[in-house]
Amino acid sequence: MAREVFDELKPRVAALARHGVTPGLATVLVGDNPASRVYVRNKVKACAEVGLHAELHELSADATQDAVLAKVTALNGDAAIHGIIVQLPLPARLDAQKVLQSISIDKDVDGFNWSNLGALVDGHPRLAPCTPLGVMVMLDRAGVPIEGRHAVVIGRSSIVGKPVALMLIARGATVTVCNSKTPDLAAYTRSADILITAAGRAKLVTGAMVKPGAVVIDVGINRLPDGKLAGDVDYDGVKAVAGSISPVPGGVGRMTVAMLVANTVAAAERSSESENLLSAG
Ligand code: NAP
């Protein structure tokens, strides 16, 4: 599915190129978190695959809040850059919200700016968060009906749980959002036609917690003691019960990267339209 998304983006990138525009994504990486480095590398690789310009701006782990804000401000004003992401997590001493909110709403391709999240709440999304968007595209491309179905989301973060719940509500699902305080989680998950897990707890969801035939999308990424990656779902146990299930790795993660590229292309198109480049033919 991610490959299909990339193939569909290529003609749009070519149309922009005819007007002298190459969509540009800038990633700001503070410090030397090894997992962040892997994520950033995958994003840069995906941009290259579709013909985007990608820049990595690295700041040392002891960079000041002002230095990070100055970097974002410079990128906000850079005409070659249409999308900006600040790789999370930031070192704990930095104010991550302040940094994220400093990204121009037109270049906020992670969709974390309160203005873009507010547009999503109101049912008029502009740039929407990539992981929830990827989940919705997966459901649509798999032909999963959403309207009138019961969707259960495990997790209520602003990055995954809440925005995916909003997207499902907008599509007419009946949505239950669970969190770490939810008593008897299984009582909810067992009634889900669509189950989306974004808790960050390996093997949280077992086969006994899933309704036969349900669609299960696993957003979680957990590092097991043996170093391997796993989702929130006991994959083999749930696969035996579910109608369909997404794997970790190789599932939502790839779609998230595809949506980041898609958001950057959309931001470049919007910026070109506002300059009348595309509408002039
Ligand atoms: P987060 O901010 O830590 O939120 C986790 C949510 O899960 C919280 O709302 C928490 O409840 C809830 N939760 C934790 N344990 C639970 C339990 N036992 N039962 C029910 N709910 C529980 O994490 P996040 O940023 O949303 O990310 C969630 C997971 O998705 C992580 O594993 C992350 O690595 C992964 N992720 C993957 C991608 C991707 O591209 N595939 C992108 C983003 C995130 P409380 O609010 O009550 O604490």
Image (cartoon, rainbow, N blue to C red):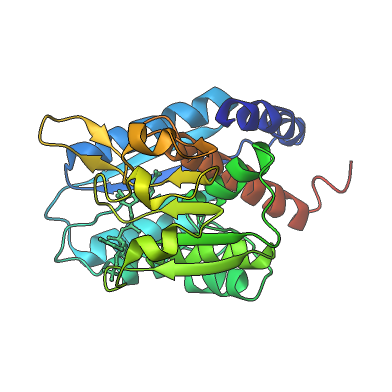
Q: Quadrant of ligand 1?
A: bottom left
The relative height of residue 41 versus residue 75 in the rendered view (above or below) is above
Residue 13 on image: x %, y %? 68, 33
Left or right of 179? Residue 30 is: left
Q: Residue at x 51, y 44 (%)?
A: 212
Left or right of 57? Residue 214 is: right
Work out whether residue 162 can be spotted. yes
Residue 219 on image: x %, y %? 40, 47
The relative height of residue 172 versus residue 21 in the rendered view (above or below) is below
Camera-side residue: 80 or 220? 220
Tell me the quarter of the picture where residue 184 sits. Answer: bottom left
Q: Residue at x 50, y 56 (%)?
A: 129
Tell me the quarter of the picture where residue 99 sits. Answer: bottom left
Residue 137 on image: x %, y %? 62, 44
Left or right of 279? Residue 258 is: left
Q: Residue at x 27, y 51 (%)?
A: 204
Residue 271 on image: x %, y %? 68, 53
